[in-house]
Amino acid sequence: MSPILRDDIDARLDLFLNDTPLMDVRAPVEFRQGAFPNATNLPLLDDEQREAIGIRYKEAGQQSAIELGLELATPDIREQRLRAWSEFARAHPDGYLYCFRGGLRSNTTQAWLREAGINYPLIRGGYKALRRVLLDALSTRLDSQPLQVLAGPTGSGKTELIQAWPTSLDLEGRANHRGSAFGRTFTEQPSQIDWENRIAIDWAKLDREPHGPVLVEDESRLIGRINLLPELQSRMLAAPLIVLEADIQQRIDRLKTDYVRHALAHFEVAEPEAPFEALRDYIANNLHRIRKRLGGLKHQQLQDVLPQAVQGLEKHSDWAGFEYVIESLLTDYYDPMYRYQLEKRSHLVIFRGRHDNILDWLARQAA
């Protein structure tokens, strides 16, 4: 480590804007409930130790809890912790450490490192103070920064446009979900707190190169199991609308990729013995989830067609069956909902066009 000593600091936003490496010494269970994208979990206490010390604290007070902590810190455990912390500190000499409130665990970690000859600063107030910095930053932007909302029918390519425009927030991308009944991916969604932290950081980073309003995709209250922040949803419902248009065949082709090709590629790895059967069951389950909105007759019709669609794809690389299923879902389920919701906010529409038309229009507005 460098002999130059760095002071402990208060929680501040530039730690996230600069992607400063952070050593999170909270227990793994705390880290899973909510963490920061630039943090690495190197706990002082594992989940069982944390629980045991918490019980002792409630039953016998702080001093007794500290004594139990010292008992649990066997030479082997202390050596393991120090090795991990030292490697992190040497790899990230510009980083900081923290626990939940910047108290006993942070100070203990810092003291053990100092005994090993490593001076590593901590963040006063810990995770709780850092989280408050992000929530305040998000609240400030919700109160002051203009938004524009990108609407468009399912399959029109809204996500592609969001990712193509630099002054935008990818709410679905950060939620790891496409925001519809068929929208789940095959990797875990973040926790609610992790999603909020990432959105707050993304939005704060946009301030570095301001180019007019922030563009977000039109969303309902839920993105999978992620709840859209009420304040954000309220702002979005009142914001100007930009409507993305696309031909029906373009939409079908895009949804074949998003909902079928990607799923099949996943099952070819996850279920190599029977990927097409897994694909059939996956789509059937998604259809079942929206059966009430589809209506019993349409739901059963699509369920009846599905096996032939899968068989045609498996045996003959024939997409006709899936094109029928996708087009039926668009015309009988997604499009009526979309038109109904858009009609209620038609007075907010400020521009309509295709992908390139909208990007050109946004560029002119930002100039």
Image (tube, rainbow, N blue to C red):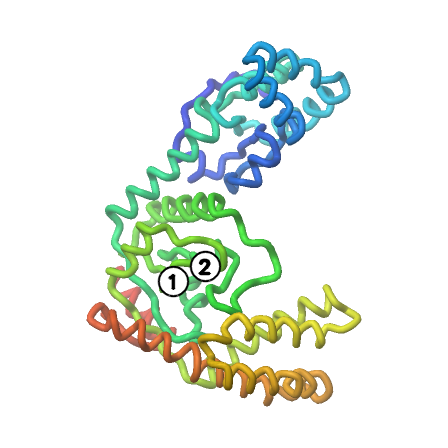
Please identify the quarter of the rendering in which residue 3 is found. Answer: top right
Please tell me the numbered disc located at residue 295.
none
Q: Is residue 292 above or below residue 145?
A: below
Label 2 crowd bin: few (<14), some (14–19), many (20+), radius 10 Å: many
Kindly identify the residue that appears in the image at 44 percent across and 22 percent down: 124
Q: What amino acid type is highlighted by mark number 1? A: Ser
Position of the C terminus, as image quadrant, is: bottom left
**Spot occupied by residue 114 in the image (x, y as percentages of width and height):** 61, 14
For label 1, the SS is loop
Please identify the quarter of the rendering in which residue 273 is found. Answer: bottom right
Q: Which residue is mark 2?
A: 223
316 or 21, which is in the foreground? 316
Q: How many marks?
A: 2
Residue 356 appears anywhere in the view: no
**Spot occupied by residue 227 in the image (x, y as percentages of width and height):** 42, 53
Label 1 crowd bin: few (<14), some (14–19), many (20+), radius 10 Å: few
Q: What amino acid type is highlighted by mark number 2? A: Ile
**Spot occupied by residue 85 in the image (x, y as percentages of width and height):** 64, 26
Q: Looking at the image, do the residues carrying marks 1 and 2 touch, with CB atoms under 8 Å apart?
A: yes
**Spot occupied by residue 300 in the image (x, y as percentages of width and height):** 56, 84
**How far, Cα to Cα, is label 1 from label 2?**
7 Å
Kindly identify the residue that appears in the image at 66 percent across and 82 percent down: 310
Q: Which residue is mark 1?
A: 220
